[in-house]
Image (cartoon, rainbow, N blue to C red):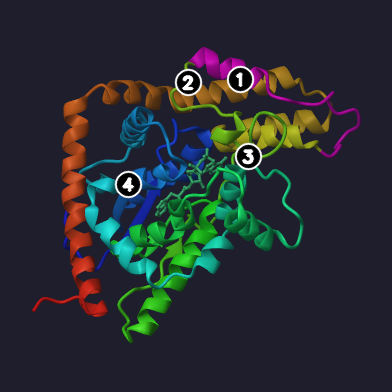
């Protein structure tokens, strides 16, 4: 691998270690990381965002276990430490210093208007129904005036600064993330532009989202509506055993079945077809679509097909996860190598940023 090849564009992405990865994380994020790595056109940096996970105050033991899970899942899905730089965010202390520096150019108002912040702040304060229209003000008032002992921690507010630093410190060109992260990426571009214009420099380039020319994938849940997500409790995990996967899929919500030819599909049924398209072959999709349209479909057969396709996709990954997770020496080696490379690039950026900002030696 040639880490000094400056002509290659830099790709960077991360996932918070808040639990084990599910099919949504895999099809929406991780499988793209692997694909980009294997194209060989980029220098790729993939990390585990443990400092970001701290914003929701996890149990320390659980956090540590979750970092191990994600690392094993990255490797089992095909990320290769010889081709990509794989690291843990907190192993790069330069990130924390640059987070302090960049915060001097970030407004608390713009942070408070971020959708993800408003969501999490409401959760922390126990506000359930946001008032339509004036919800920015609503959250602000609650935070400043809160008379309860609940609090919204400052780390949650500055989450976007930290994410911008992850990206800017590695001078990334492309950041493959799902739709839910686009606002954070937009803020990153704004902070980069602001820094450049304040210090009259062209130092940072503006990072772009990346997917392979197609719309971002959204894997639906099996409960009829919405997306598959940890907090939704509707996930198929990469580590789920075959029989668990079968059971979860067979329980998926459907409807009474089509009664007229070419009837429009209800959302839960559409969701099953969306999953089939992601995990199955085109001829199977065609077969079941035809069966739906001529009212001969049996949802039990459709679910069996989906379950078998998911099992075929995840079983090899699952087996590798279990092997890798127990190999502490290997995990240690991977992270040591990753931290060294990630720090090399980060410390160069940090030194430049310190100098640009006027923190120079006497
Ligand atoms: P979760 O919603 O389960 O907590 P995260 O927010 O930690 O997942 O997401 C990690 C990555 O996985 C992000 O890039 C996100 O866009 C992607 N992702 C999560 N759920 C899905 C889904 N159902 N479909 C597609 N991508 C997803
Ligand atoms: N905020 C991202 C998420 O919740 C995780 C993340 C942190 C990230 N830093 C990043 C993603 C930098 C891409 C680039 O999924």
Residue pointed to by mark 4:
47
Residue 135 position within the rendered picture, expressed as x and y whole percent measured from the top left: 70, 59
In the picture, residue 224 is in which quadrant?
Answer: top right
Residue pointed to by mark 1:
248
Which residue does the image show at 86% across and 37% down from the upper left? 263
The question of residue 256 being in magenta is answered with yes
Disc 3 residue: CB within 8 Å of ligand 1: yes
Query: Judging from the image, what secondary structure is the residue with disc 2 in?
Result: loop
Which residue does the image show at 69% across and 36% down from the upper left? 271
Chain part drawn in magenta = 242-264
Which residue does the image show at 66% across and 22% down from the upper left? 303
Residue pointed to by mark 3:
227
Disc 4 residue: CB within 8 Å of ligand 2: yes
Q: Nearer the viewer, residue 105 or 215?
A: 105
Q: CA distance from mark 1 to mark 3?
A: 15 Å
Left or right, 353 with reference to 16:
left
Q: CA distance from mark 3 to mark 4?
A: 24 Å
Q: CA distance from mark 1 to mark 2?
A: 10 Å
């Amino acid at each position: 691998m040639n880490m000094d090849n400056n002509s290659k564009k830099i790709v960077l992405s991360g996932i918070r270690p808040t639990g084990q990865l599910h099919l949504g994380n895999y099809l929406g994020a991780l499988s793209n990381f692997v694909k980009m790595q294997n194209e060989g056109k980029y220098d790729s940096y993939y990390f585990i965002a443990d400092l970001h996970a701290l914003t929701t105050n996890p149990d320390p033991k659980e956090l540590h276990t979750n970092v191990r899970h994600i690392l094993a899942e990255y490797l089992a899905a095909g990320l290769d430490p010889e081709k990509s730089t794989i690291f843990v965010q907190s192993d790069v202390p330069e990130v924390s210093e640059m987070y302090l520096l960049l915060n001097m150019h970030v407004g608390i108002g713009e942070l408070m208007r971020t959708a993800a912040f408003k969501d999490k702040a409401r959760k922390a304060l126990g506000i359930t129904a946001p008032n339509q229209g004036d919800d920015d003000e609503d959250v602000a008032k609650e935070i400043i005036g809160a008379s309860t002992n609940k609090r919204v921690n400052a780390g949650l507010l500055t989450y976007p600064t930290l994410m911008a630093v992850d990206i800017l410190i590695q001078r990334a060109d492309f950041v493959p993330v799902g739709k839910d992260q686009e606002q954070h990426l937009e803020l990153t571009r704004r902070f980069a532009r602001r820094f450049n214009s304040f210090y009259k420099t062209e130092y940072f380039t503006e990072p772009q989202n990346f997917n392979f020319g197609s719309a971002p994938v959204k894997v639906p849940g099996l409960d009829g509506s919405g997306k598959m997500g940890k907090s939704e409790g509707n996930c198929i995990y990469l580590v789920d055993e075959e029989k668990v996967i079968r059971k979860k899929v067979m329980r998926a919500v459907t409807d009474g079945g089509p009664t007229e030819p070419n009837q429009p599909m209800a959302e839960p049924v559409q969701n099953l077809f969306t999953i089939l398209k992601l995990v199955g072959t085109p001829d199977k999709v065609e077969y079941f679509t035809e069966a739906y349209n001529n009212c001969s479909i049996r949802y039990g057969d459709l679910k069996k097909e989906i379950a078998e396709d998911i099992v075929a996709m995840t079983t090899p990954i699952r087996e590798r996860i279990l092997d890798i997770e127990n190999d502490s020496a290997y995990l240690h080696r991977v992270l040591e190598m990753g931290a060294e490379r990630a720090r090399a690039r980060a410390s160069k950026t940090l030194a430049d940023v310190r100098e640009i900002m006027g923190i120079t030696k006497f």
